[in-house]
Amino acid sequence: MMRKRYAILLAVMVASIMGPIDASIMNINYHIIGGYFGTDLSTAQWLISIYLLTISSLLLFFGHLGDISGYKRIYTTGLLGFTITSGLCTLSYFFNSIYILILLRAIQGVTAAMMMSVPHAIITSAFPSSERGRALGINAISISLGLAIGPSLGGFIANSFGWQFIFLINVPIGILGIILAQRVIPEIKGEGGRIDIPGALFAFLFLFSSLFLINRFRDFTMNTRTIALITIAFLSMLAFLRQERRTPTPILNLSLFQNINFSLANVSALFNFMAQYFIVTLLPSYLGRILNLPQNRVGLIMTSFPLAVLIIAPFAGILSDRIGTKFLAAGGAFLCAFGLSLMATLSPSSSLTSIILRLIIFGIGTGVFQSPNMSLAMGSVPRVHMGTASGIIATVRNLGMVLGIAIGGMLLSLFVPSHILSGSSAILGENKRLFTSGLSQTFMRAAVLAGISGIISLLQKSPHRNHTL
């Protein structure tokens, strides 16, 4: 029985590595792709934005659909679609338009949402509560490994063979994941019922319009498009909440939030991911433009963060099964806050060793926080709602990423003159001090967010064992 459980975990891990690899590879190569098609950076950035927006807008729906039609079906269909669209993205090289690739990235985002919406439900259903933290911690290895190897691997492939080949990384991994999933993942369903089509439509409109506004917050201007998006977001939110209260099988089961631990775990995760993405998006600019490091060295230094998570998360999960989740999650969040406060002391002459040490401290804190917090959230919901809960958690994670990127960029632009932030060349002279000072102010705000995450974790109640069994 134990062998079967860990075979299921392995099947999920093989596929779970694909999303982080794909995202991190695109983050460092989108400007190269834009250059090939002769477009500006703002257009090329849609290769990242449309993918993230599509995923975030559909996670709730596919989590709900997993409860109805089965987690395995949603997961394997998404895995198959992601593998196929990855191959198609490579073929876009032969078309003289970046918009075809942007369209394919949107479709890829749909399949990625299917693939990412139910893994936590599959793992939690397969493992008893006494092993849940361990299993979720081990699963975090694949995510951290994908984030760790993605930048270096993507840079190597793009430089050696061409950007079009970066998408082919997913194909052999996807085929292996499909074979394993078909063989070992059992057919697991949740509550059953009918699909809430109106709720799905309202949820998509609300999430997509809201996240689009957040994603473009730095360029916010009150024009006709902005007013239309705000109106769509507000009206679709009202329609969605009304629909969810009336339908017997809602996409977002609002009763789940009556469980204080589930609600607090998600809010805590939101603040933690916001703080995390201050580092992920802003530190590379410091490394490249202040320390004047080449792109490959920037990628290697940034890798120290996910590597620390990779090492620590499984042990944090095992420990949470033995001593509980509350104080571990809080301690991890406070360690993240400490790491960010150290980031706020960076100077134009900081050594690479000291920067890596700061990233490792933050990575350890993240690893200690994530597994126990995830275990608490998934252990707080009834088994029939595992898919919905998994979709909510994934949506909160992506929302934290989008908010972190938008707020971090906005704060930096408030503290640093715009002429320094514009462009991608090295920053010289007095401007180095101005940029670093503004970055320090921004990282201190991120430390506050991580501290809030820790305080929220302390408000959680110690759960009873075997709650979901």
Image: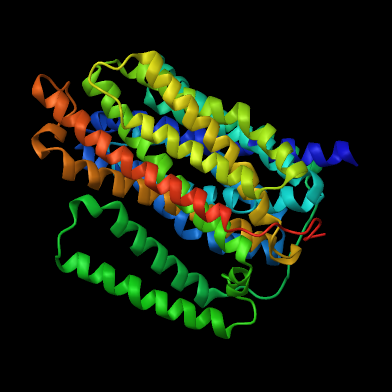
Residue 165: quarter of image: top left
Q: Residue at x 48, y 22 (%)?
A: 304
Q: Is residue 198 left or right of residue 189?
A: left
Q: Where is residue 312 drawn, in percent x and y?
A: 62, 30
Judging depth in this view, the residue of 124 and 177 nearest the camera is 124
Q: Is residue 265 left or right of residue 213?
A: right
Q: Quadrant of the C terminus?
A: bottom right
Q: Where is residue 437 drawn, in percent x and y?
A: 20, 32
Tell me: residue 342, above or below residue 386: above
Point out the residue furthest to the bottom here. 246
Q: Is residue 134 left or right of residue 109?
A: right
Q: Residue at x 58, y 73 (%)?
A: 254
Tell me: residue 41, above or below residue 53: above
Tell me: residue 156, above or below residue 433: above
Judging depth in this view, the residue of 75 and 437 nearest the camera is 437
Q: Where is residue 134 drawn, in percent x and y?
A: 73, 39
Residue 100 visible (yes or no)? no
Q: Residue at x 55, y 82 (%)?
A: 245
Q: Is residue 325 left or right of residue 144?
A: right
Residue 130 visible (yes or no)? yes
